Image (spheres, rainbow, N blue to C red):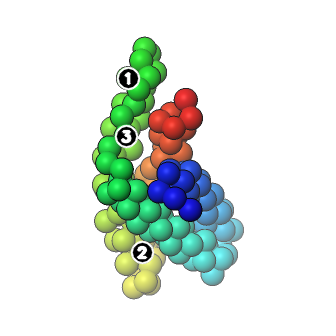
Amino acid sequence: MSVADLPKVNATLNGLSFALLLCGFYFIRKRKIKIHKTFMLSALAVSALFLASYLYYHSQVGTIHFKQTGWIRPVYFTILTSHSILAAIIVPLVLFTLWRALRADFIKHKQIAHWTLPIWLYVSVTGVVIFWMLYQL
């Protein structure tokens, strides 16, 4: 695999993280705590792998510029801006949510997870959208 393959790998990891998060949410709603934990820890591992791959890719190639013009340009930058801000916020939020679960403080875990999950889902899915807009459009 070459560095040029990493954007597709990263988009795949983002999509997988999204799916794992949805599965984790589904199983906690069904009160299947062990299965929920497995899916959420898998989402964390996949997201960590994504982050390492993303940072390595951009350390090698630098910034990729969006070349499209017209109405799609402000749409892209709106998505990119919201994605970037929330991506910076989600890392400590996920770690804090995990810390609450590991301490078995499930009331506070649920309170913070109420915010963490939708933000994490948004960051994951917009990562795929950004890949599509930047590399496939």
Identify the mark nearer the N-term, 3 or 2: 3
Q: Single out the mark in the foreground, 3 or 1.
A: 3
Residue at screen point 42% across, 18% down: 69
- Farthest residue toward the front? 2
Residue at screen point 40% across, 56% down: 57
Identify the mark nearer the N-term, 1 or 2: 1
- The relative height of residue 90 versus residue 46 in the rendered view (above or below) is above
Q: Single out the mark in the foreground, 1 or 2.
A: 1
> Cα distance, mark 3 to mark 2?
33 Å
Residue at screen point 43% across, 14% down: 70
| Neighbours of disc 3 within 10 Å: few (<14), some (14-19), many (20+) | few
- The relative height of residue 55 versus residue 82 in the rendered view (above or below) is below
Q: Which mark is residue 85?
A: none
As rendered, which of 3 and 136 lies closer to the eye? Answer: 3
Q: Position of residue 116 (x, y in %)?
A: 42, 59
As rendered, which of 56 and 106 lies closer to the eye? Answer: 56
**Disc 2: which residue:** 98
**Disc 1: which residue:** 74
Label pair 3/1, CB-CB below 8 angstroms: no
Secondary element type, mark 2: helix
Identify the mark nearer the N-term, 3 or 1: 3
Residue at screen point 32% across, 57% down: 59
Label pair 1/2, CB-CB below 8 angstroms: no
Q: Amino acid at mark 2?
A: Leu
Q: Amino acid at mark 3?
A: Ile
Label pair 3/2, CB-CB below 8 angstroms: no
**Disc 3: which residue:** 64
